Image (cartoon, helix red, strand yellow):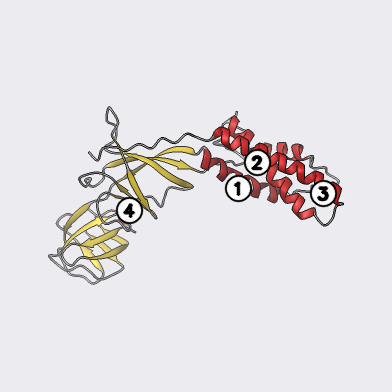
Amino acid sequence: MAEKIKTIRTIARQMLRDEFQPSEDPDITEDELDLHIKEVLVEISLHRPYEVKETLTTCNRSGSATATTADHLIDTANAHFVAGDVGKTVHNSTDKTTAKVTAYNSESDLTLDTNIMASGESYTLYHLDGTSGKDLDISSITDLLEVEKAEYPTRQSPQEFRNCIVFGDVLTLDVDSEPTDGDEVFLYCHKVHQLTESASTLRPDLEKVLVEGVVAKAAVAWCNKMRSQIVPQSYQWHKDWANEQDARYRLGLNSITKRRVWEFYSRG
């Protein structure tokens, strides 16, 4: 059963011999412990990430403006705009200019941040900062470390995996032809593990390494803070103990490191 952050704090305090007593303050505050927990969670995630499959859809809609209205894209012929288009990129393929959608007015009317469209001019609608239908906006994926691979088209047997390139919040599928609008894409993501008062993504072996890391970092921080307040002999003992805990933590990180095998997939 996964432990929650309160339990991790308690175990770490016990190992540090800093159990909270009602009549006195602990040497290490809860905020300090939580900072160490956050730091160790990231380090653990770099060695053994939280693996999550995210689902996104492509954006690759095109047409021609049917009217000229300043700072608007009007297309009554297709009438295929939706509220979710706010924030996406409009590329004027006639003038080779771009603008960002700032408001959805109707199925045939979008407000743009730049006046680029005139009646009869062609356009394509892509994800934010996208330059083709191969581009996906991944800004909504929280705590992302990396995208290992993409699956497109989805739900095939065998599965169709693709390589991908990430630059900022734009992921580009490594495929030969552009996807059509609204196609489903599965992204196999590596994320930072989560630990809260109510939930945890850590397995028991990772929890053990988490505690070891928190103890090591808290011990080192305490020694640095108390250097001038304790006698040298006592300080050296505490420092040696802190270094031992850090060495144990580093061994734990090595033991959970996921072996990485690089694969290159067909462009399809």
Q: Residue at x 79, y 45 (%)?
A: 238
Position of 148 compared to 250: left or right? left
Residue 250: x and y, percent? 62, 39
Local SS, label 2 = helix
Total marks in image: 4
Q: Between marks 1 and 2, how big is the CA–CA gap?
A: 9 Å
Classed neighbour count for the residue bearing mark 2: other residues with Cα under 10 Å, few (<14), some (14–19), many (≥20)? many
Residue at point 74% right, 40% down? 13
Residue under pointer 3: 235
Label 2: which residue?
A: 213
Expressed as whole percent of the image width and height from the top left, the position of residue 176 reads 21, 44
Find residue 180 and report its horizontal and vertical position in percent.
Answer: 21, 46
The local crowd at label 1, few if under 14, some if 14 to 19, many if 20 or more residues have their Cα within 10 Å, is some
Q: Secondary structure at mark 4?
A: helix
First in sequence, mark 4 or 3: give its number.
4
Q: Can you tell which of label 2 and label 4 is closer to the viewer? A: 2
Mark pair 2, 3: CA separation: 20 Å
Label 2 to label 4: alpha-carbon separation: 43 Å
> CB atoms at circles 2 and 3 under 8 Å apart?
no
Which callout, 1 or 3, points at the residue further toward the start of the chain? 1
Please give the residue where the numbered disc 1 appears in the rendered image.
Answer: 39
The Cα–Cα distance between marks 1 and 3, rounded to whole angstroms, is 25 Å
Front: mark 1 or 3: 3
Front residue of 63/81: it is 63
Inspect this view and state whether residue 52 appears.
yes
Looking at the rendered structure, the kind of residue marked 3 is Tyr
Residue tagged 4: 84
Of pointers 1 and 2, the one earlier in the residue sequence: 1
